[in-house]
Image: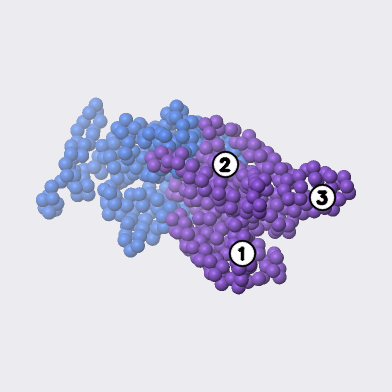
Chain colours: A purple, B blue
Amino acid sequence: MKVQLPYPLLLILLAVLAIAFGCLSMLIGPGGGPAEILAMLNHGDRDLAWMIVGQVRLPRTLLALMVGGTLGMAGAALQGYLRNPLADPGVVGVTSAASLGAVLALYSGVSMAFPMALPLMGIAGAVLCAILLQGLAGRGAVLTLVLAGVAISSLCAALMSLALNLSPNPYAAAEIMFWLMGSVTDRSMDHVALAAPLMAVGWLMLATAARSLDALSLGEEAAASLGVHIPRTRALVIGGTAISVGAATAISGGIGFIGLVVPHLLRAQVGHSPSKLLLASAFGGAALLMAADVLVRLLPTGMELKLGVVTALIGAPFFLWLIFRARAELES
Amino acid sequence: MKIDARSISVTLSGRSIVNGASLSLQSGELVGLIGPNGAGKSTLLKTILGLRHRTSGEVLLDGASFLEKPPQERARHVAFLPQERHVEWSLPAREIIMLGRYPHRARFGGPTADDRLAVVRALDAVDGHAIAERPVNILSGGERTRILLARALAVEAPLLLADEPIAALDPWHQLHVMEILRERARAGAGILVVIHDLALAARFMDRLVLMHEGAIAADGPPAEVLTPDLLGRIYRIEALAGHNAGESYLLPWSRRRERSSNDR
């Protein structure tokens, strides 16, 4: 990791990587590889080919890229704002709140009658969480924000357990469990259309805060003396995370470790600059999650593994390895 | 340019920290803000900058209300070097200094040629070119202080408030920082420095403002402020005074014995 690529080159490389995995995602999966698809086209099965590529794989691919990008960018923004390399979108409770909203939609059966209720309630959960955080944290310090986030997370986890506990039958409980594991399969272009504008708003809010994150490396007082409006920066970071990660979680369920690991991997490559890390982590997150979603299709498991399970299975040991490697630095 | 803080009072959870303190700073002068620990020096500095809420008082910049101005405009007029020297990420020194250009830069887009030149001038001022590309977290305390000072200088504000810029530095670095500040003042900047080292304060400052229990106890040339009487009453010390090569110096020598405080 001693070699540091020029920033534009790094961005191009990560974007190419994300697009390459995206192309791979369009070509493989249940329904057949490129050869089978081509055969369908040759035999006049245009409709079937379109169904597989356009209606099954395209939304899946787009969502993996969008969700991965969102998690990477929000993770980088939170690490910058909280000045803590261990932060990720989960730490402020946004992920749990969005999950709780979605679980309530599943539990109450609203999602049966109206499928879009699930992501909509998830997003509502994330937005409520952001409003609660703003109210609790007031003008206060970073620590208040993190503690409030932990409290909100615990409460949401408890309520999700309650929903599981009260589930009318094992199938309802299993449905909730499977949703919580996190996945981008069986989503439609409607999901993409719902998430895309929200994520775009969130990304823009995070990007607007980028330069203030740089100034915050000097501490809050020095940043404020340079003209950084601290409460506004916090509102942008919390609000941007809530909207973009809320939308991501509402669509895909809980996908962990991307927001934590990706900024870690790329920090040295951007010369530790919090602002440059945002875009790099967005592209890196998109590439990594896309790669993971291609991987689950290639693994010879009887039933396709859930994406969230794989990111955690790879992410957690990787994170341990990072800690092991950086131990000396952390302890100094 | 002149900044005037008038009758500033700050109360924190019922405790009065600053009590009706007034002080001014104008272009071209190097002023030391001195006083025992807990006198309210840092709080006064931060209140003037708008980083703390004041209970009463006003701050005027060339006669206009300073704290009403938008934060970026305030930042362009008055730079601040906090006591805090921790930098969270291991940014290269040059990038740290570039942060001083924040109030001049737009929200998006790279630094302008002006910004880069300001960084070079700041590096010139602190003699920091040799360490400009190093990550700030591997620099020594003295080097890091110089880079953070360069960060404050890169703002190129007419006025600079520095909170204990020479604390925890070796004598070579203390003298170096004082010389840099002296030079900036000579070049036209107005600089207010919170400082505990009375010997350096006496030698380098044009004027000293002595704070005690939240109020200004004395304000004037070093010789008029560092009198045996004020040193005894406020600092509870006795100091040796002498002359060397035409300059007078001051050396804190002993704690005043408690008896004499009863005599008062």
Identify the amino acid type marked 1: Ala
- Are both tags, 1 and 2, on one chain? yes
Rendered residue at 87%/45% (across/down): A42
Residue at image coords 53%, 55%: A90
- Looking at the rendered structure, the kind of residue marked 3 is Ala
Q: Which residue is pictured at 70% across the width and 65% down the height? A: A115
Look at the numbered discs 3 and 2 and tell me whether their residues touch, using CB distance below 8 Å: no
* Residue A222 is at least partly visible in this image: yes
Q: Quadrant of the N terminus of chain B?
A: top left
- A146 above or below B160? below
Horizontal side, residue B54 vs residue B228: left or right: right
Which of the two residues, B71 or A324, is positioned nearer the viewer here?
A324
**Quarter assignment of residue A198:** bottom right
Instruction: Decide if residue A297 is on the left or right side of residue B55.
Output: right
Disc on res. A174:
1
The image shows residue A226 at horizontal and vertical percentages of 48, 46
What distance separates the C-alpha of mark 3 from that of mark 1?
A: 32 Å
Q: Which mark is residue A49?
A: 3
- Kindly report which numbered mark, 1 or 2, lies closer to the viewer in this rendering: 1
Asked if residue B152 shows in the view, the reply is no
Q: Which secondary structure lies at badge 2?
A: helix
User: At 19% from the left edge and 36% from the top edge, which residue is drawn?
Assistant: B241
Spot occupied by residue B99 in the image (x, y as percentages of width and height): 50, 40
- A41 or B42, which is in the foreground? A41
**In the rendered structure, are the residues bearing label 3 and label 1 in contact, judged by CB atoms less than 8 Å apart?**
no
Secondary structure beneath dot 1 equals helix
Q: Nearer the viewer, residue A95 or A84?
A: A95
Nearer to us: label 3 or label 1:
1
Q: Judge if badges 3 and 1 mark residues of a common chain.
A: yes
Comes first in the chain, label 3 or label 1: 3
Separation of marks 1 and 2 at Cα, in angstroms: 41 Å
* Proximity of marks 1 and 2: CB atoms separated by less than 8 Å: no
